[in-house]
Amino acid sequence: MKIGFCAKLDMISEVAAAGFDYIEPSVTSVQHLTDEEIGAYCQKMEEAHISAPSFNVLFPKDMELLQADPQEIYSYLDGALARVRKLGGRVVVFGSGKSRMRPESMHYDDAFRRLAGVTRMIGDIAGKYGITIVIEPLNRGETNMINSVAEGACLRAAVNHPSVQLLADYYHIAVEHQPPEDLARLQGIWHAHIATEIGRKVPVERDEGYVSMLRAMKATGYQGLLSVEGKSDDLSQDGPRSVALLRQLWEEA
């Protein structure tokens, strides 16, 4: 199990020094990088013995996916994912709660169909670059579309695309009071995030909820990554503790 940390590429050195295996930056933070800047970041990752196999925050907040021009979405994704691939990315998280919000005037059925269509297009573009998109269920405080892992599995099934898979995030699972054990019945996930339920911080202490989620993941033969997506006042202290804890819990699962 490789354990990473969600952060900007400017934190490559700090993330590596904290003991993480990789860094997970946002797509929106790299969408305008030049080839020269990408090369510099790749060099820095190589020197730090760290990689960026996964990315999050696929869309900017002001891109309303259920109402945007498909060509606008396509143009944005084509440029952004090309940069992600050059940086070594192979997994991209489709969270972007603001972007996928359903307008109050739009019926849920219509919104779901549109979201499925957009997600299918995302899969087409991602596939061109050898990238897998993972749908991230978010809590209802962040979006009104796809709020549980089960709903995410339904969207994955509706899209039915080889480049579109599913993510499980412990923070959102806990906030929505979903049983982590449900992961075992959803035909598996492709990627995972974790943070504390209270305060969304870097996990440094044992929580039986983490154990339940990791056990369910292991029961499905999970082979993916685990990204810590939490706040820390001192990553140099919290990072090593978190990595050690999560490795121990994975062994126990």
Image: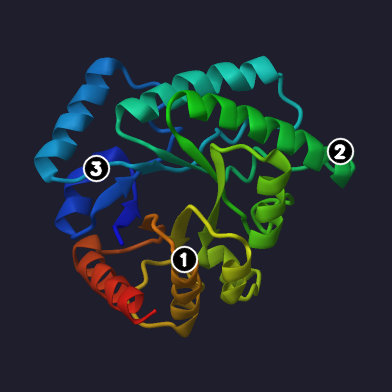
Q: Is residue 184 visible?
A: yes
Q: Which residue is mark 3?
A: 51
Residue 110 marker: 2
> At 86% from the left edge and 38% from the top edge, which residue is drawn?
110
Dot 2 crowding, Cα within 10 Å, few <14, some 14–19, many 20+:
few
Question: In this orientation, which residue lies closer to the viewer: 47 or 151?
Answer: 151
Q: Position of residue 137 (x, y in %)?
A: 62, 55
Q: Earlier in the sequence, mark 3 or mark 2?
A: 3
Q: CA distance from mark 2 to mark 1?
A: 33 Å
Residue 214 marker: none
Q: Are marks 3 and 2 in contact (CB under 8 Å)?
A: no
Q: Which residue is mark 1?
A: 200
Going by the numbered disc 3, the residue's amino acid type is Ser
Q: CA distance from mark 3 to mark 1?
A: 24 Å
Quarter of the image where one finds residue 113: top right
Q: CA distance from mark 3 to mark 2?
A: 39 Å
> At 46% from the left edge and 84% from the top edge, which residue is drawn?
208
Q: Is residue 64 visible?
A: no
| Mark 1 residue element | loop
Q: Are marks 3 and 1 in contact (CB under 8 Å)?
A: no
Q: Is residue 76 above or below residue 219?
A: above
Going by the numbered disc 1, the residue's amino acid type is Arg
Q: Earlier in the sequence, mark 2 or mark 1?
A: 2
| Mark 2 residue element | helix
Q: Position of residue 104 (x, y in %)?
A: 85, 43
Q: Position of residue 19 (x, y in %)?
A: 18, 60
Going by the numbered disc 2, the residue's amino acid type is Asp
Q: Earlier in the sequence, mark 3 or mark 1?
A: 3
Dot 1 crowding, Cα within 10 Å, few <14, some 14–19, many 20+:
some
Q: Is residue 14 left or right of residue 69?
A: left
Q: Is residue 227 above or below residue 117?
A: below
Count of picture labels = 3
